[in-house]
Image (spheres, rainbow, N blue to C red):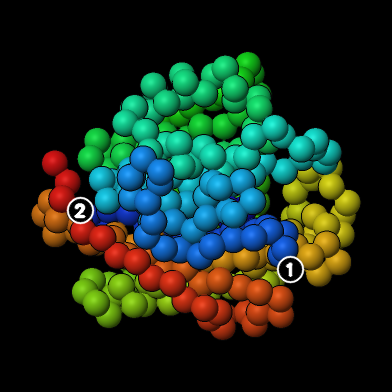
Amino acid sequence: MCLVAFAIGASTRRPLVIAANRDEFLERPTLPLARWKTASGQEILSGRDLRAGGTWLGITPGGRVAFLTNVRQATSEAAPRSRGELVTRWLTSDADAAGFVAGLEENGAAFGGFNLVLGDLRQKAWTWVTNKYAGAPVLHAQALAPGLYGLSNAGLDTPWPKTVELKRVLSAALQSGDGAAGDESLQALLWTALGNRQRALPADLPHTGVPADLEEALSSAFVEVPGRAYGTRCSTVLLATASGRDWDIRLEERTHGRGAIAGAAGPIHREQLSFRAP
C-alpha cells in the first residue's frame, strides 16, 4: 500500500479502523481480498501478489494484523526479497513483535524501503517497523500507543498532504455516530477520501528526489500515472466494532483498473470474522 490511516484503541466501540490504498503497476498480477490458507494450514484474510506471493494487508482469525507501505527513494535497485513477504511472515508467526523484529535484523537490508505495522489484537500490542530510519543500523521498531496514525511513502505520521487529509477524515468519521447507520456513514466518508484525486499544490509537495511531475502525480490519495501504467489498484476499509470482549471485524476491498471513476466502486470483495479478545 502507499497510503493508510489507522485508528487503534481510539474509540471504545470501534477499537480498530483501517483505510488504505494500494498503489502498484497495473500489470502486476494480483488476487483480490479472500480467505485462503497457507501451505502450513494457516488461514489468512487478504489479497495476494501473484508475482512474489506476499500481501500488503492481512488479518488472521487469531487476531494478528499487518500492513505495509513502501518508502519512496529517488533511485532504487531491485531488492532480492519482496516486501509483501513481511506481512505474511508476521501473520503466520507466533512470535511477539520484539522476537519477530529480532529475526529480521540479519536480512532487513534485503528488502526495499518499507514501513511495516504489526498488530496483535489478543495482546493489544501494535508496532511500527522500518528499515529506513535515520540513525538505525538496519531496523527501527517503535511501539504504538492507542491513537490515530498515518503512513504514506515516508516515515510514520510524516505530514504529506494526502496523509494529513486522510487522517483528518478518519478522525471526523470516528465521530459519525453509533449503531449501523453510524458505521455506514463512517465507511462512506472513508471511501470518498480514498477516491480523492485532488493533487497537492506545488508548494506543498514533498521532495523525495523523483521528478517533479511524478511527485505531483503521486500526491493525491487515489493515484493515476497512465504514462507509467501505475496507480491505485485497490482500496480497503477494515472496520472493527466491539461489544465487551466480542469483536466483529469487516473488511471491504474495492479493486480498480484502468479508467476507474473517482468515488465509483469497482469489483467489491468482502470478508468478515468474529473475534473474542482476552
From the viewer's perspective, is residue 229 above or below residue 45?
Answer: below
What residue would you read off at disc 1? 224
Mark 1 Cα-neighbour bin, 10 Å: few <14, some 14–19, many ≥20? many
SS state under label 2: strand
Image quarter hosting the C terminus: top left
Q: Residue furthest front?
A: 39
* Residue type at tag 2: Phe
Secondary element type, mark 1: strand
**Residue 229: quadrant of the picture:** bottom right
What amino acid type should be assigned to the residue bearing mark 1? Glu
Which numbered marker is on residue 8? none
Q: Which residue does the image show at 80% across and 35% down from the upper left?
A: 77
Give left or right: position of 19 versus 203.
Answer: left
Q: Position of residue 133 (x, y in %)?
A: 62, 27
Percent from the top left, x then y, of residue 184?
A: 34, 77
Q: Position of residue 194 (x, y in %)?
A: 55, 68
Residue 268 in view here: yes
145 left or right, relative to 33: left
Residue at the spot 45% in from the left edge and 63% down from the top edge? 33
Q: Is residue 9 left or right of residue 203?
A: left
Give the x, y percent position of residue 267: 52, 78
